[in-house]
Amino acid sequence: VLLVLDFATRQGPAMLRAARQPKTLAILALSTLLIGGNWLIYIYAISHEHVYAASIGYYLNPLVNIALGTLFLGERLRPRQWAAVALGGVAALVLLAGAGDTLAISVALALTFSFYGMARKVAPVASLPGLTIETVLLIVPSAFLLQWEAAHGAPPTFGVSPLRDALIAVAGVVTAVPLLMFAAAAKRLDLSTLGFCQYLSPTLQLMVGLFVFHEKMRPAQMAAFAVVWSAVALFVWDALAVRRGSNARA
């Protein structure tokens, strides 16, 4: 699908140029490992009924984005943004105190996706060619993993039912679309702002855990969600205040 999109939008030459540049290819190889690991951890969490742990991981993601943006990219935060970060830190401490065995899932998801965002931000390649190269690079380890599982008696993935085959294929497209949008946004937004924009996804995951999978929420998770939502509200308040100030000066 990505290769077709590349050549339909005439970005095939850009993809080939990026693939021939060692520095760009090295950055994309790193981002490939990060996003591949993120996918595996996320799918493990969902399949083992740790939906809330996955949701919390993506709620913590903006905190790591902010840290990376301020430490490595020279981004600066306003006082209300720092207060939002502090609230997020409180949420992380609450999780550390009561999340138990799911804390590793949450932290791993936050770290892998945040570093992926940073890698894509500094990679000198557009979103579609970059994602295409990442997907091509994932073919080799994916094929190796599938072969290893088959050799150790894992049940077949395809051929179980037409519906399952279709869902697996569609999942690839469903994954590619938001990643394309994310990579494009990473080029245009501060890493800290981008992180807070991502709170929609874990909120939807929370709703799925509550109303679709009927997963029980631990007290620590409930408290962490409440603190994180307060941090999001503070960040949004700051963004609206800055926009109103800019409009007033204009």
Image (cartoon, rainbow, N blue to C red):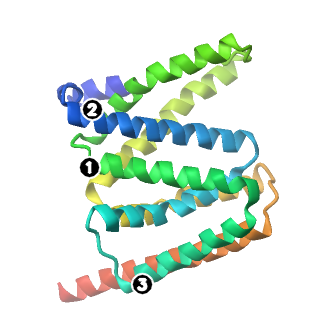
Name the residue nearer the viewer: 134 or 71: 71
Amino acid under disc 3 = Arg
The answer to whether any part of residue 59 appears in the image is yes
In the rendering, at what x and y percent does residue 89 appear? 55, 73
In the rendering, at what x and y percent does residue 67 appear? 40, 66
In the displayed structure, 221 sits above or below 132; it is below
Amino acid under disc 1 = Val
Mark 1–mark 3 distance (CA, rounded to whole Å):
27 Å
Give the number of the disc on residue 25. Answer: 2
Please name the residue that numbered disc 1 is placed on: 122
The quadrant where residue 197 appears: bottom left
- Tell me if mark 2 has few (under 14), some (14-19) or many (20+) residues whose alpha carbon lies within 10 angstroms of its own: many
Of the two numbered discs 2 and 3 in the rendering, the one whose residue sits closer to the viewer: 2
Give the number of the disc on residue 80. Answer: 3
In the rendering, at what x and y percent does residue 171 appear? 56, 32
**Tag 1's secondary structure?**
helix
- Tell me if mark 3 has few (under 14), some (14-19) or many (20+) residues whose alpha carbon lies within 10 angstroms of its own: some
